[in-house]
Image: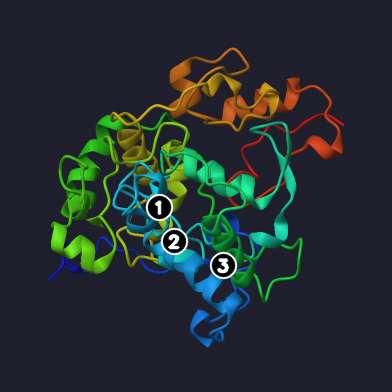
Amino acid sequence: MSPMLGVLILGILCGLIPQARAESTVAESSPGSYQLPPWRVPDVAALPDDDNGRLVRLGQALINHTTALIGPDAPEAAERYSRSGLECTNCHLDGGTKRFALPLVGIAGLYPKFSARVDAQQDLADRVNDCMERSLNGRPLPRDSKEMRAILAYLTFLGSYQPAGQAPIGRGAPKLPLPARAASAQHGARIFQSMCAACHQSDGQGVRLPAEARAAEQRRYLYPPLWGPESFNDAAGMARVMTGAWFVDANMPYGINFHYPLLAPDDAYDVMAFVAEQPRPHKADLAKDYPDRWLKPVGTMYPPWVGPFSAAQNRFGPWQSIIDWRRTHAPPAGADRVPAANDLEAAVFATPKQ
């Protein structure tokens, strides 16, 4: 029996897994109504064996087998763009196809768009390289490389059923109510040991595959590390307590979905506060992010911040008072500089005055 399955069975036997979320709760925490539209994902296997089909399949392989193809286990040193032990699919579950699990479905049709992080328009290749440098703690892929073209082809293919410019309902992760208190890393440590350590281990370093299995499966970990030298760096979206909590609530332990969360919302915030306090790689020049500080998402883990709030409150909450203050004090912003809302950030960007 896998550790994850054991945790799920224990939760069922002990009555820890709640019934499906009530309609009102789901309606508040996820876009749209409780009766969600169908989630359509095109089948890569149905593509013909032509140039485009092969390119899309390579893109899918890069998402699922990142460490083996463009990471630390790539055959040639020049091909090792990622320095982490993570695969893209560790965050974008099931190759980026699972609803409310940071899916990649439909994302291609949303670019180019304004990015508050750089205070400029970004295209999809820019966004891919954001992940390369942050979540994968690596260096950018050359824009004209076969690997970049393959990833873009795969992302475009995943949006085959989605109208351009329209975000699918299920992108990102369902928003949770913000806690009225600060997220507690101390309580999160207990949650981690009881609910997460079975897979990610008590030291958070995951389960690393032996060399033979790594080569056969083309991945480095059975369960990925959540901190330490082979995890995401401190500029990654998952390093942010709020982002991580929403993802964990809807998807962890692996196999959970947003209808049947295993963790209570406050527990999800607490466990990610614990994870956020652990050591991880540092990305240089973070002060250059978000040149317009008013467009920096509430809950971003690194300074500088705006407002009369402590570093601890900015990082761990309570966040509602920061949101309220920013709504009152934010300067005017042009419509072209307001970040495009998505499932992860719509509720936590400052609301610029018009």
- Above/below status of 183 relative to 111: above
Q: Is residue 286 above or below residue 86?
A: above
Question: Residue sitting at 32 percent across and 41 percent down?
Answer: 231
Q: Position of residue 241 (x, y in %)?
A: 43, 37
Q: Residue beneath label 2, please? A: 62
Q: Residue at x 50, y 23 (%)?
A: 314
Q: Which residue is label 3 attached to?
A: 154
Labels 1, 3: front one: 1
Q: How far is the residue under mark 1 from the one under mark 3?
A: 16 Å
Front residue of 194/77: it is 77
> Which residue is denoted by mark 1 in the rendering?
70
Residue 268 x, y percent position in the rendering? 37, 46
Secondary structure of the residue carrying numbered label 3: helix
Q: Kindly state the secondary structure of the residue where label 2 is placed.
A: helix
Q: Is residue 21 visible?
A: no
Q: Is residue 324 visible?
A: yes
Going from N to C along the chain, the mark reached first, 3 or 2, is 2
Residue at 49% x, 23% y is 302
Q: Are marks 3 and 2 in contact (CB under 8 Å)?
A: yes
Labels 1 & 2 near each other (Cβ < 8 A): yes
